[in-house]
Structure formats: C-alpha cells, structure tokens
Image (cartoon, coloured by chain):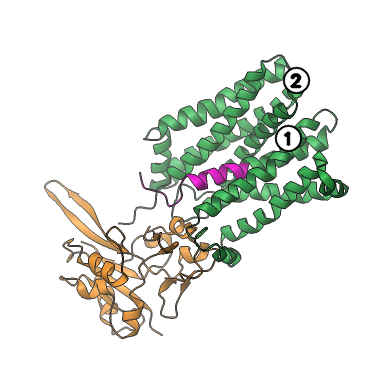
C-alpha cells in the first residue's frame, strides 16, 4: 500500500465537514417541512452544523505543516482560484459563521439569536447553498487530483454528498434524542430519510466501485484493495454491513414500527451511520494508488 | 530563454544511487530525504529477463498539476521552465503531493513546507548543471536546453526517440527517457 500524503486529520475533516453540512441541510428541511413536531431535530441539526465543520477546519489547520509553525502563511491560502483548497477556504469561512448564526436564530441564543431570527429565511437560503457547496467540495477536492486515478471521477462528489446527507441526518437525530428524549417517537418519521439516503449512497458506492474496476489499472488496484485486498475486511464490515446494511434495515423497521422500536436501536442505527461515513472516507483516502510511472 | 530538461539513458544506469547522495549534499537533505529515486523494474520473462533502473525526479511539467492545485501559489514556474516552491508562501497543505502523478514531492517538516527537485537552479544559473547530472559515474543524465536543436540533450532525445514517463497523463514532462 502506498502511503498517502494525507492522513487521519484529513479523513476526520472530510467526515466532519460532510456530517456538519448534512446536519445543516437536515435542520433546514425539518424547519421548513414540519416546524411544529420536528423542532428538536431542527434545533439539534443547526446546533451541531457549525461546530462540527469548525472542528473539521481545525483538523485541516493542524494538518498544514506550517499551520502552527508560521500560522500567518495561511493568509496565502486564497491566492489561487484554480485550486480547490482556495475555494474550500472561502466556502468554509462563509459557511461556519452562517451555520452558527442559524443555530443562534433557531435556538434563540442571547441577543445574537434575537437579531438573527429576523433574517432566518436568508440564513436558510444562503446557508443551504453553502452547506451543499461544503459537502460537494470535499468530494471535488480529491476528485480533481491527477495523482490518484481512483479519486479522479465525477462520482466522487456524488458519493460524498450522499454520505454527507445520511451522516448529517444521523447527527441531527442523535442530537434530537439528547436534547429531548421524548421526541424519539417522532424521530421515526425521519427514518424514511435514512432509508432514501442510505439507498442512494449504496447505489453510488456500487457504481463507483464497479466503474473503478474498469476505468484504469490504478483505479482498479484501489478498488480491488477495497473489495478483496488488504482493506477488504474494513470495507465490508465497517462500510457495507455496519455503515449501510444494518442501519438501512433498522430504519425500515423503525419507520413501520413507528416509535415502538427500543431507543437504543434508534440511536444505535444513527451511530452506525456515522461509523460508516467515517470509515468510507478513511478507506477511500487510504486506498488511493498513484499512477504506475516506470 | 532556455527550456531546461534532462534526458535519461536508463540503459546506462547501474543503480549506484550516487545521484541521490549528490542531491542530498547539494540541497542539505537528511539521510532519509531525497528529491530523486531509482526505481527498479523487472522486465521480460525467464530465461530472457533482467532488471531496469529508472531514475525518477521532478519532471518540471509544462502543465504542472502541482502548480494548478497549489492554493497559495507557492509553486511557480520560472522563465527557464523550472518548477520551484516558494518557501515563504508554502503552508504545507500537501495538496500538490496528492496531485503529482509522479509522487516526487516530499514534506520538509523542519521548515513546514513541501519541497522537490529544483534542477539545482543556483548551479544552473552560474552555467553549471544539476548535481545529479555531474556526479553520475556512467553519465546517465544529460542536462540542457530542449529548445536548442543543437544541444546534446535535443540530439539525444531525437536520436533515441526518448519519451517522458507516462506522456498520456498530459502534464508535458521535461525529463525524457531512453528505455532498455
């Protein structure tokens, strides 16, 4: 296995940015679609979004080799608009404050919240756009790289988007259970969301793997590393079974049982989705294989 | 302005790693750090088989993917066509290392930056050649101006139809190889 220049900090960032932006979208959707009975979910999602992405951004800064050594060099990060990192820095710099303001508005935190709540609809619109940008950009970031053919496909941002949606919803549902455990019954309404997002994620993941097997020698090497090589135990157990299959089945049961499922299973399914999302990103980063040049 | 490149004759390479040591000396690199490598490749099948040594270093691509993805603009191309890293603006995000298909960039942790082969630009501007070129006991590398049809390198590339590594990646590398 070839050592990647990027390690766990970048994996954590990709996961946190996805989960945070997904949670924001989940919060906006709940806020718009069912403001009366999904209040806890919208509050939890909005509260989680900003901090999650901010922690992810801290991981990014820690990964910079000069991040803490000579931090002022970070000002140059917005120099080159043909670099996805420049776009990422701009998107993150806008998204984090807007997500925090939206959380303040929904949860009526201090005077900031009171002022922000007057502009909720703008925060919602601009925030959703930036949330989608954040989720998609994490995929584009690695998809535009020539050095790793496995990542170099338009399916990459799609896969990360799908994963961001499911992990974001999971974050919002766990948060709602923490804020108000009595809402656990109403959470069953959102199990359908999990069913849809996980199904989309599974289909995109399948296309991604199948197409990688024939795209190029190096992409095929990476893909076979995942499905039958050194990383296959992690891929099948953590991503496919624990991250997609089990939460998918649990969410279907949850939807039809409507509130009768044990609380531990409801929250457990969400935790598994998070585990799957993190593992997916780790495996994609660590299975990247450079072109064979000699 | 010249357009510097290197022609590599892999049929002459004996894999002694003198180029690597010379490079480390010239650039003050530590024992484990290097800007050039010798990749060994097995070719043929028994009984007609053998080993080939392929020296690899930064290709100073004309369409450098590392330069395109560098968020700070620290990676730049000089007028001589040499791709360099500005240590004052590089923040060490390592995006260039992911973007480089040849994987010839390394992190210099004590400076917090990413570095790579610089074609020994300080020697070249004084009229010399890079350390890896001058030190090679079998004269595997030829350094020179690719735009000058009479230069040794241009003649060599034309005579042996030398090709860059993976020209299909379309980065337009400036290191040309005669393969065995």
Per the rendering, the mark at residue A44 is 1
SS state under label 2? loop
N-terminal of the two: label 1 or label 2? 1
Q: Colour of chain A?
A: green
Quick check: can you spot residue B162?
Answer: no
Q: Quadrant of the N terminus of chain A?
A: top left
Vertical placement of residue B62 versus B129, above or below: above
A284 or B62: which is nearer to us? A284
State the image coordinates of residue B58 (x, y, percent, origin top left): 36, 66
Q: Chain of mark 1?
A: A
Residue found at the far right of this picture: A118
Image: magenta residue range: A1-18
Q: Which picture quadrant has residue A248? A: top right
State the image coordinates of residue A250 (x, y, percent, origin top left): 62, 20
Judge left or right: residue B108 versus residue A114: left
B54 or A24: which is nearer to us? A24
Q: Colour of chain B?
A: orange
Residue found at the far left of this picture: B47
Q: Nearer the viewer, mark 1 or mark 2?
A: 1
């Amino acid at each position: 296995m070839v050592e990647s220049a990027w390690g766990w900090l970048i994996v954590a960032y990709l996961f946190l940015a996805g989960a945070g932006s997904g949670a924001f979208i989940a919060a906006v959707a709940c806020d718009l679609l069912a403001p009366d009975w999904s209040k806890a979910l919208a509050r939890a999602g909005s509260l989680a979004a900003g901090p999650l992405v901010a922690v992810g951004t801290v991981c990014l800064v820690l990964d910079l080799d000069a991040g803490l050594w000579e931090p002022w060099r970070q000002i140059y990060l917005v120099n080159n608009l043909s670099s996805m990192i420049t776009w990422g820095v701009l998107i993150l710099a806008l998204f984090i404050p807007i997500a925090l303001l939206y959380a303040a508005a929904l949860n009526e935190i201090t005077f900031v919240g009171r002022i922000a709540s007057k502009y909720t609809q703008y925060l919602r619109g601009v925030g959703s756009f930036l949330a989608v940008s954040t989720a998609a950009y994490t995929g584009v970031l690695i998809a535009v790289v020539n050095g790793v053919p496995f990542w170099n496909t338009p399916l990459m941002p799609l896969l990360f988007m799908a994963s961001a949606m499911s992990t974001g919803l999971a974050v919002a549902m766990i948060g709602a259970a923490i804020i108000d455990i009595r809402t656990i019954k109403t959470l069953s309404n959102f199990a359908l969301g999990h069913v849809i997002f996980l199904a989309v994620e599974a289909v995109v993941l399948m296309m991604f793997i199948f197409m990688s097997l024939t795209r190029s020698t190096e992409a095929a090497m990476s893909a076979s590393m995942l499905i039958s090589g050194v990383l296959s135990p992690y891929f099948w157990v953590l991503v496919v079974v624990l991250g997609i299959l089990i939460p998918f089945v649990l969410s279907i049961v949850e939807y039809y049982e409507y509130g009768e499922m044990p609380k531990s299973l409801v929250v457990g399914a969400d935790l598994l989705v998070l585990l799957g999302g993190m593992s997916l990103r780790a495996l994609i980063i660590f299975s990247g294989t450079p072109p064979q040049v000699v | 302005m010249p357009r510097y490149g290197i022609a590599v004759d892999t049929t002459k390479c004996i894999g002694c790693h003198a180029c690597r040591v010379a490079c480390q000396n010239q650039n003050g690199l530590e024992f484990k750090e290097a800007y050039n490598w010798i990749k060994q490749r097995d070719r043929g099948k028994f009984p007609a088989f053998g080993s080939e040594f392929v020296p690899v270093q930064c290709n100073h691509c004309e369409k450098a993917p590392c330069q395109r993805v560098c968020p700070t603009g620290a990676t730049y191309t000089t007028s001589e066509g040499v791709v360099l890293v500005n240590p004052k603006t590089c923040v060490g995000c390592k995006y260039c290392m992911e973007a480089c298909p040849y994987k010839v960039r390394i992190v210099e942790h004590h400076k917090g930056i990413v570095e790579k082969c610089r074609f020994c630009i300080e020697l070249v501007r004084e009229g010399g050649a890079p350390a890896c070129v001058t030190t090679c006991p079998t004269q595997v590398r030829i350094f020179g101006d690719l735009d000058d049809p009479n230069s040794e390198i241009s003649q060599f590339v034309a005579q042996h139809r030398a090709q860059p590594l993976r020209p299909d990646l379309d980065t337009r590398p400036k290191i040309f190889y005669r393969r065995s």
